[in-house]
Image (cartoon, rainbow, N blue to C red):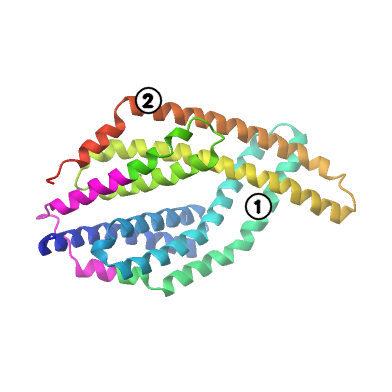
Amino acid sequence: MKTFEKVIIRSYIGDLFKSQISYLENQIEGIVYDENIEFLHHTRVMSRRIRNTITVFSPFIGKKTSKRWFSSLKKLTKSLTKVRDLDVQIAFLEKEISEISEQKFLTGLQRLLLRKQQLREKKQTGVKQSILDFEKEKSLTEIQLFIDNNPFDSENFSPPNELKRLGHLEVEKLTKICFSYVPFITSPDNTEALHSLRIAMKNLRYTTELFQPIYPQLESSISTMKKFQDDLGEIHDYDVWLADLDRFLDEEKQRISKFYGQSGPFNFIKPGITYLIDDIKNRKIKTHEEFLKRWNDQFQNQFWANLRMIFENYDE
């Protein structure tokens, strides 16, 4: 690769990082000083986006540096994921309880909400500690130094062929990974395949967005990917719920038996949980049907062929 191409690509990476870390720093500040759960969600999402940027452009950043930054951000993402899942579940339960009219279901749902709130409160200290640990590693300081050392000239920028080639190779690779799960998407019971497709689709979307400044026509494709990702994310949330509810029934029954010396009071809790299990199963089926229709419609509309065509525009 020619040296001037590498210089231009590094400046392009720096410009991507610039907006990403500015946003991440604002969200982290929100977690520390504000109780709005959206700050935590946005921090988690942006930490994933930055990790994706590091992965795609690792050859231009440096292997050791990329590994260090990636590891630091991954620890941050992981520490926040379970907390974010609890926030989503608590909001879901609060909405369910506000809409339930049958008293016999309320006791179980309210007990489940209480347990989720108790667990969330226990994890709050861990959230702030995770932020402190992340800040101590100075990854964002190092990324800022990378930005400063690789200034981006937007007025004179012209994407080098090597940058376009990289986009083509990455999108081709990730598209193939997505399609490796397609034979299994017709059944909502293929939990692992749908979960893996969700992750692959997220990686494809984030990678595609990295090249949107070069290909503005990608906006429609990215919008479609987001819809796929949202559908699959909702299905995954339902799968997490179903596993949680089975576990909750077992744990709560044991807790009640230990406290009362018998499990009779558990019968007041069980109806609400079995109602929720049935409700979530039905929601999952409906969401899966909507996802499958969207997928098939977009396939017929040549979505994948059009996406590839955009990235094929470079000199071999």
Q: Height in image: 79 above or below 216?
A: below
Residue 30's mark?
A: none
Work out whether residue 224 can be spotted.
yes
Q: Height in image: 133 above or below 157?
A: below
Q: Position of residue 221 (x, y in %)?
A: 30, 37
Q: Quadrant of residue 225?
A: top left
In the figure, is residue 108 to the left or right of 224? right
Mark 1 or 2: in front is 2
Q: Position of residue 20 (x, y in %)?
A: 32, 58
Question: For the residue marked with disc 1, what is the amino acid?
Answer: Lys
- Magenta stretch, main secondary structure, is helix
- Tell me the residue at 58%/52% (across/down): 86
Tell me the element at label 1.
Answer: helix
Name of the residue lying farthest toward the right: 261
Q: Which residue was labeled with disc 1?
A: 116
In the figure, is residue 128 to the left or right of 5? right
- Indicate which disc, 1 or 2, sits on the residue closer to the N terminus: 1
Q: Which residue was labeled with disc 2?
A: 297
Asked whether 292 or 133 is in front, the reply is 292
- Tell me the residue at 16%/62% (across/down): 6
Q: Is residue 181 magenta?
A: no
Question: For the residue marked with disc 2, what is the amino acid?
Answer: Asp
Span colored in magenta? 144-173
Q: Height in image: 106 above or below 160?
A: above
Of the 4 image quadrants, the one containing the N terminus is: bottom left
Q: Is residue 147 magenta?
A: yes
Q: Position of residue 95 (x, y in %)?
A: 61, 40
Q: Quadrant of residue 83?
A: bottom right
Q: Residues within 10 Å of mark 2 (few under 14, many from 20)?
A: few
Tell me the element at label 2.
Answer: helix
Work out whether residue 159 can be spotted.
no
